[in-house]
Image (tube, rainbow, N blue to C red):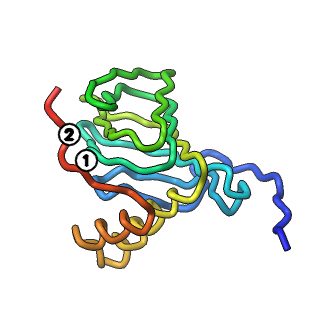
Amino acid sequence: MRRMLRPYVLAAGEGEPAAAPEGSVMRVKASAESTGGGLGLLEGVDEPGFATPLHRHDVAELWYILDGHYDFYVAGEWVPADTGAVVYVPGGLPHGLRAGPNGGRKLTMMIPGGSEGFFRDVHRALKEDTATPETFRALGAEYGIELIGPLPES
């Protein structure tokens, strides 16, 4: 039997704690569980210079830049994005991002939902002091995230 979805509201600062291995502090605002699988939504706060590795996965990602500047590396080119910008990356394309010199804050939407669980699990591993590069690689594999390597220089 299918679970009945319910409307909900999360206030600023609310949501399940999450984190990126590279240091982004996040909150899950919507999950596959709360949206019937439709999407996952995370709010992330990033320190200056925060950067993800170059990676690929099957889910599409969309970012809305709430504050600051980010540079996105998508399919071989760097794309700048400032406050108010939207960046969309279809599933399967190699990509990564780097926060600017003042850091930033962003919303990250994953379509369909489910891979937001990676960031919940990373947060859990960090809190339980079980986080290692091997842990992060195993979690990435579990959620279909293929690590390619470091971001190229811009």
From the viewer's perspective, is 86 left or right of 80? right
Q: Which residue is mark 1?
A: 53
**Residue beneath the point at 48% across and 22% down:** 85
Q: Residues within 10 Å of mark 2 (few under 14, many from 20)?
A: some
Q: Does residue 132 appear in the picture of this structure?
A: yes
Furthest residue toward left: 153
> Please, what is the three-letter code of the amino acid marked with disc 1?
Pro
**Residue beneath the point at 31% across and 58% down:** 21
From the viewer's perspective, is 83 left or right of 72? right
- Spot occupied by residue 104 in the image (x, y as percentages of width and height): 38, 34
Element at label 1: loop
Location of the C terminus (image quadrant): top left
Q: Which residue is mark 2?
A: 151
Badge 1 or badge 2: first in the primary sequence: 1
- Spot occupied by residue 42 in the image (x, y as percentages of width and height): 53, 48
> Please, what is the three-letter code of the amino acid marked with disc 2?
Leu
Q: Nearer the viewer, residue 149 or 98?
A: 149
Q: Nearer the viewer, residue 79 or 14?
A: 79
**Residue beneath the point at 44% across and 28% down:** 67
Distance from the alpha carbon under mark 1 to that under mark 2: 6 Å
The image quadrant of residue 79 is top left
Location of the N terminus (image quadrant): bottom right
From the viewer's perspective, is 51 left or right of 24? left
Q: Nearer the viewer, residue 25 or 40?
A: 40
Contact (Cβ within 8 Å) of mark 1 with mark 2: yes
- Spot occupied by residue 64 in the image (x, y as percentages of width and height): 51, 31
User: Does residue 143 sit above or below 112 in this rendering?
Assistant: below
User: Does residue 73 sit above or below 118 in this rendering?
Assistant: above
Element at label 2: loop
User: Does residue 41 sit above or below 142 in this rendering?
Assistant: above
Q: Does residue 66 appear in the picture of this structure?
A: no
The image quadrant of residue 81 is top left
